[in-house]
Amino acid sequence: MRTITTIAELRREVAAVRERHGSTGPGAGDPVVGLVPTMGYLHEGHLALVDRIRELVPFVVMSLFVNPTQFGEGEDFEAYPRDLSRDMELAEQRGVHVLFTPSVAEVYPAGRPLVRVVPGPLADVLCGAFRPGHFEGVLTVVAKLFGMTQPDVAVFGQKDYQQVALIRRMARDLDMPVRIEVVPTVRDYDGLALSSRNAYLTEVERVRARTLSAGLFAARAAFAEGEAAADRLKGCAVITMAEAAVNPEYLELLDPDTLAPLAEARAGAVLAVAATVGATRLIDNVIL
Ligand code: AMP
C-alpha cells in the first residue's frame, strides 16, 4: 500500500494504473479504480466497504480526510477521533492499494470553495434539518474527491442513508461517470451500528446507545407481523429507546428514494433515527 498526501501524486498513480489496465478513463470499459471515502478512525464498517469494492475493481483508493466544511459550528471537528498509524495498518491488511490522506490545505488551498454543490430538497429533512450546511459540505468534498481520483466505482455505507441518497442523486443529476455502490450497515455484537463516534461513549452510554438499533429492530419486527401504520411502528421504536431515556431527535418512516415521509409502511421503506446519547449524536436506519 502507498500512502499519498497530494492530489498531483494521486493523479499520477491513478493514471499509471489505468495505463497498466488499458483503461481510457472513468466509466469507459471494465471498471479499474474504486474509491472508498472515509474520515478515518477505521472500523469494520469501513473495511466492509473495502471488501465490497475489491469484488468490483482491481485497484482500491481509500481517502481519509476529516472534512472541516461538513462540521457545523460547535460540532466535533476538533475532537473527531484520529489514529493514522492504526488506520494505515488496517487499510493495508484489508487490501487497499492507495491511502490518500491529504491535508486541509491540500483540499482547500483557498479556504472554503466559492463554488459548492447545492444538495437541494433531499437535504431539508432528517439530519439536514438539524445540521445546516452539512450536506453541502459532504457533497462538495465528495465531488472534489471524485474529481481528484476519477474512480469508476465509489462505495458508501447504508448507515448514512441520507448521505448516500444525496450522493447517488448528485452523480445522476451532474452526470458524474461513477457507479455508486452501497454496503449494508455493519453492527456490533449487540446491534449498535459501528461508528467512529462510538469511541466517545462512556460504558453507561454505550449500553443506552444499543436501544437505537433495538428500537428500529422492534419496529421492523412489528412490520413483519403485519403492522403498517407509521405512527404505531414509530411507537414501537420510541418505547424501546425510552427504556434507556433516549429521545430521538428525529424518527421518520420514509420513501427510500425521495425521502418523503410515509404514513403507511411498505417493503423497502426506510425507518431512520438520530439521537444524542450523552454528548454523542448517533444515527441509524433499517429498511423494512
Ligand atoms: P465516515 O468515516 O464515518 O465518514 O464513513 C465513511 C464511509 O463508511 C461512509 O460511506 C459510511 O456510510 C460508511 N460507514 C460508516 N459506518 C458504517 C457501518 N457501520 N457500516 C457500513 N458502512 C459504514
Image (cartoon, rainbow, N blue to C red):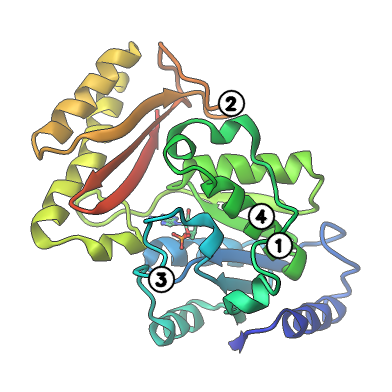
Question: Is label 1 or label 3 in front?
Answer: 1
Is residue 163 found left or right of 222 in the rendered image? right
For the residues bearing labels 3 and 2, Cβ distance under 8 angstroms: no
**Quarter of the figure with the C terminus:** top left
Query: Label 4: which residue?
Result: 140
- Mark 2 or mark 1, which has the lower sequence index? 1
Query: Label 2: which residue?
Result: 258
Query: Label 3: which residue?
Result: 42
- Mark 4 or mark 2, which has the lower sequence index? 4
* Amino acid type of the residue tagged 4 in the rendering: Thr
Residue at (67, 66) in percent of width and height:
34
- Local secondary structure at mark 3: loop
- Local secondary structure at mark 4: helix
- Mark 1 or mark 3, which has the lower sequence index? 3
Please determine whether, in this image, residue 211 is positioned above or below residue 28. Answer: above
Distance between mark 4 and mark 2 Cα atoms: 21 Å
Question: Is label 3 or label 4 in front?
Answer: 4
* Amino acid type of the residue tagged 1 in the rendering: Lys
Task: Give 129 or 52, whichever is nearer the viewer.
Answer: 129
- Local secondary structure at mark 2: loop
Ligand 1 within 8 Å of the CB at mark 3: yes
Is residue 239 found left or right of 131 in the rendered image? left
- For the residue carrying disc 1, how many other residues have a C-alpha within 10 Å: few (<14), some (14-19), or many (20+)? some
Distance between mark 1 and mark 3 Cα atoms: 21 Å
Ligand 1 position by quadrant: bottom left
Image disc number at residue 144? 1
* Amino acid type of the residue tagged 3 in the rendering: Leu
For the residues bearing labels 4 and 2, Cβ distance under 8 angstroms: no
